[in-house]
Amino acid sequence: MRISVFVGVSLDGFIAGQDGSLDFLRPFEGEDHGYEEFMHSIDAIVVGRATYDAVLGFAAWPWADKRVVVLTHRPLRALHGETSHAGLLAPLARRLAAEGVRRVYLDGGVAIRQGLDEDLVDDMTIATVPRSIGVGRPLWGGIPRMVDWVLASQRSYPSGLVQVRYKRAR
């Protein structure tokens, strides 16, 4: 099983505004950055609670045909068949793999940092937009340690967005 990250980030390293807003990404939504193709390769989504709550505010549920596991310690009122998980990601990853899941999309800042801290992330697609927002929810953080990644692809877009895909060097 592979665990993958696909995320948009400001030039100064934030994945959301301080209030969780994704407004800084809106000007770049018109370009095809491969998200739909990526989603076709995903069997399950493991998402942090803050990101999940933000997605609930979207006009339509974007993960209708996907299994969704929400990382949370709080009670979850599943509106679309979601389940919840609390604690380390490794036991969840083992369970999903045993159940036949081939590829997981790990989404949400805290969830991504937890996956990186536990050395579970196999590949990351990071779309950096040419905009700094000064303050917000960071992509990077977590436990300090050196981890090697291999550049798998890179692409720039007319809007100035630059997308890189890295695979974990193991």
Image (spheres, rainbow, N blue to C red):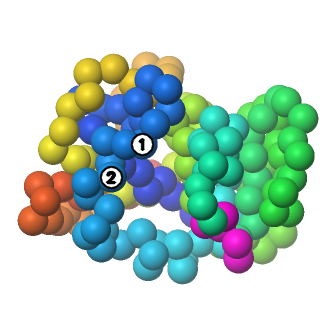
Which amino acid does the dot numbered 2 rest on? Answer: Arg
Q: Magenta stretch: residue 141 in it?
A: no
Secondary structure under the numbered disc 1 in the rendered image:
loop
Secondary structure under the numbered disc 2 in the rendered image:
helix
Percent across and percent down for residue 95 are 83, 57
Which residue is at 27% across, 38% downward? Answer: 10
Q: Which residue is mark 2?
A: 26
With respect to residue 16, does 33 lie above or below?
below
Asked if one can make out residue 95 in the rendered structure from this viewpoint, the answer is: no
Residue at the far front: name it: 59
Q: Magenta stretch: residue 64 in it?
A: yes
Q: Horizontally, is 128 left or right of 58 in the view? A: left
From the viewer's side, name the closer residue of 45 and 28: 28
Which residue is at 28% across, 68% downward? Answer: 30
From the viewer's side, name the closer residue of 97 and 53: 53
Percent across and percent down for residue 85 are 82, 42
Whether the residues at callouts 2 and 1 have beta carbons within 8 Å, the answer is: yes
Q: Which residue is mark 1?
A: 22
Percent across and percent down for residue 72 are 78, 35
Q: Which residues are magenta?
A: 61-65
What kind of secondary structure does the magenta stretch mostly adopt?
A: loop
